[in-house]
């Protein structure tokens, strides 16, 4: 799913279709938090037969199904609410993420006004939070394996896999939620830049 912020009041989503093609769908930019999944492991597809967009979990994603997506047969069309659309599970999850982001001092997409500078500061703060959690996980790994004296200067996929096997559920959840906050900030940056 590719997201293009149009100047004005619309967002264009380029989504895969059930017939293996691509479809561009114009949606209102206002209230994106009600329908746009902040978790990048979920994306919209378009059903040619049903003629509507539905949410799917990416094939390789094995994490929690935070939006309760189901097979196409049991999907429902997004709800129209005034001038916008709503995916109830996405709206609920995004609200949860925005509350956490606000508590951590990050700007949120529902703020009346925010600048590009606010978003950049949000990225910096979020980067510090992510780095802190990663350092805790990595330090624990190094303590548990005395043969490892220090982390590699350029971590490999094998290193990351080994280190994150020792992460607690709380740490993994925090990193997933930080990822969703990152997606929200990315959308906010696109909106602030008008692209």
Image: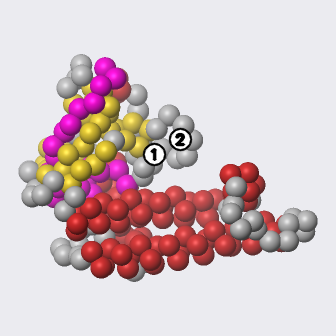
Q: Which structural element holds mark 1?
A: loop
Mark linked to residue 166: none
Q: Residue at x 28, y 30 (%)?
A: 22
Query: Could you tell me how far apart the alpha carbons at marks 2 and 1 are, in whole angstroms?
Result: 6 Å
Q: Nearer the viewer, residue 60 or 100?
A: 60
**Circle 1: is it few (<14), some (14-19), or many (20+) Cα within 10 Å?**
some
Q: Residue at x 63, y 68 (%)?
A: 134
Observer able to see residue 106: no
Q: Nearer the viewer, residue 70 or 135?
A: 135
Q: Which residue is mark 2?
A: 61
Q: Which residue is mark 1?
A: 41
Q: Residue at x 45, y 78 (%)?
A: 125
Question: Quadrant of the image for the C terminus?
Answer: bottom left
| Displayed quadrant of residue 32 | bottom left
- Is 24 a magenta residue? yes
**Circle 2: is it few (<14), some (14-19), or many (20+) Cα within 10 Å?**
few
Report the span colored magenta.
18-38
Q: Which structural element holds mark 2?
A: loop
Residue 91 placement (x, y as % from top left): 30, 54
Q: Nearer the viewer, residue 49 or 77?
A: 49
Q: Are marks 2 and 1 in contact (CB under 8 Å)?
A: yes
- Is 51 a magenta residue? no
Question: Quadrant of the image for the N terminus?
Answer: top left
Observer able to see residue 83: yes
Residue 97 placement (x, y as % from top left): 39, 63
Residue 105 placement (x, y as % from top left): 39, 80
Task: Single out the residue that lies furthest toward the front.
Answer: 154
The earlier-in-sequence mark between 2 and 1 is 1
Q: Relative to 51, does residue 164 appear above or below in the rendering?
A: below
């Amino acid at each position: 799913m590719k997201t293009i912020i149009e100047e004005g009041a619309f967002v264009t989503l380029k989504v895969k279709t059930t017939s293996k093609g691509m479809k561009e769908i114009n949606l209102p930019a206002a209230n994106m938090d009600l329908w746009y999944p902040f978790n990048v492991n979920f994306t919209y597809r378009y059903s040619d037969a049903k003629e509507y967009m539905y949410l799917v979990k990416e094939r390789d994603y094995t994490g929690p199904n935070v939006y309760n997506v189901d097979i196409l047969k049991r999907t429902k069309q997004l709800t129209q609410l005034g001038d916008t659309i709503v995916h109830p599970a996405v709206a609920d999850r995004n609200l949860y993420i925005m509350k956490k982001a606000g508590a951590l001092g990050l700007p949120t997409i529902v703020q009346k006004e925010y600048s590009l500078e606010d978003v950049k500061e949000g990225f910096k703060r979020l980067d510090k939070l992510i780095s802190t959690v990663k350092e805790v996980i990595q330090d624990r790994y190094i303590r548990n394996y005395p043969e490892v004296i220090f982390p590699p200067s350029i971590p490999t996929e094998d290193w990351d896999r080994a280190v994150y096997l020792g992460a607690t559920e709380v740490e993994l959840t925090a990193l997933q939620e930080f990822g969703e906050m990152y997606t929200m900030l990315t959308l906010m940056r696109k909106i602030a830049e008008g692209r």
